[in-house]
Structure formats: structure tokens, C-alpha cells
Amino acid sequence: MIVKLILNLILVPIPDIGVNGAAWASVACHLVAFTIAITSLRKTIKLDLTFSKFVIKPVIAVAIMGICSYFSYLTLLGIIAQKLATIIAIIIAVIIYALAIIALKVFSEEEIQMMPGGSKIDKVLKKLKVY
């Protein structure tokens, strides 16, 4: 909270940044909260989080999703109404993100099993020879 308050006071009055400074302050605030939570979890329950699995692979999946949804939106924009193009691009983004998470093997078989409907998802992934 202190990080957000300080950054808001510093960034928002800058004319080139303005209200966008509040958004950046929120991101910084959440980053600090995330860091504190992860550090606490690692110390308390000896949580083993690999940087690749929890940062790099999700960032790659987000980048793939963002690029695909952006270009699908631009393609659809010339064909259908803007609102419908946005909705379809969001649906495409969700599908692409799920496929990217699966392709990058972000979740282990055990983690997939713990999800709602995880045993069915696991069977399908094994039939497709993904896991």
C-alpha cells in the first residue's frame, strides 16, 4: 500500500504520465505483495517454485496469446463489427492460452489431476501424447 501511495504521489503529477502513473503504481504494489507472499511461502512451507515454470513459461504463453488475439482482432475487424470482433478475439485468446499452457507443459500430470475434471483432461492429453 505504501509503494502504491508513494508512486501515485510521484507519477500522477508528471504531465507525460498522468493517470497512467496510477496503473503503474498498482502494478508495482502487486509486484511487492507477490514478492512478499512468495518469500513467505518459500520459508514457511519450503515451497519449491522454479523460475522457468512459474514465470518464463507463463510469460511465453501470454506473449503467444497476445500476438494471436491481436492479429485475429485485426483480421476480423475488416470483416465484422468491432464489438463482435473483440468478443471473438477474446475467445480465441482463451483457447490459444490454454493450448500454449498445455504445449509448454506448465502443469505436471499431478497438477492436472487436481483440477476440476482433471482426470478427463489427463486422459485426453495422454491420448494426444502430450504428457
Image (tube, helix red, strand yellow):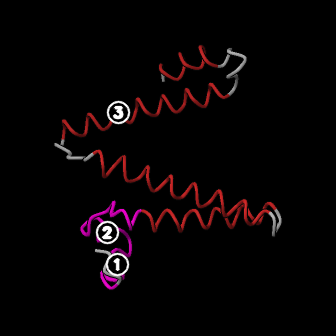
Residue drawn at 25 percent across, 47 percent down: 50
In this picture, residue 116 sits left or right of residue 88: left
* Residue 60 on the magenta span: no
* Among numbered discs 1 and 2, the one appearing first in the sequence: 2
- Label for residue 125? 1
**Image-quadrant location for residue 70:** bottom right
> What is the spatial separation of the Cα atoms under label 1 and label 3, in whole angstroms?
33 Å
**Image-quadrant location for residue 11:** top right
The dominant secondary structure in magenta is helix
- Label for residue 112? 2
Q: Residues within 10 Å of mark 1 (few under 14, many from 20)?
A: some
Q: Nearer the viewer, residue 119 or 62?
A: 62
Q: As shown in the figure, which amino acid type bears the numbered disc 3?
A: Thr
- Discs 3, 2 touching: Cβ within 8 Å: no
63 over 81 or under it: above or below: above
The residue beneath circle 3 is: 35
- Label for residue 89? none
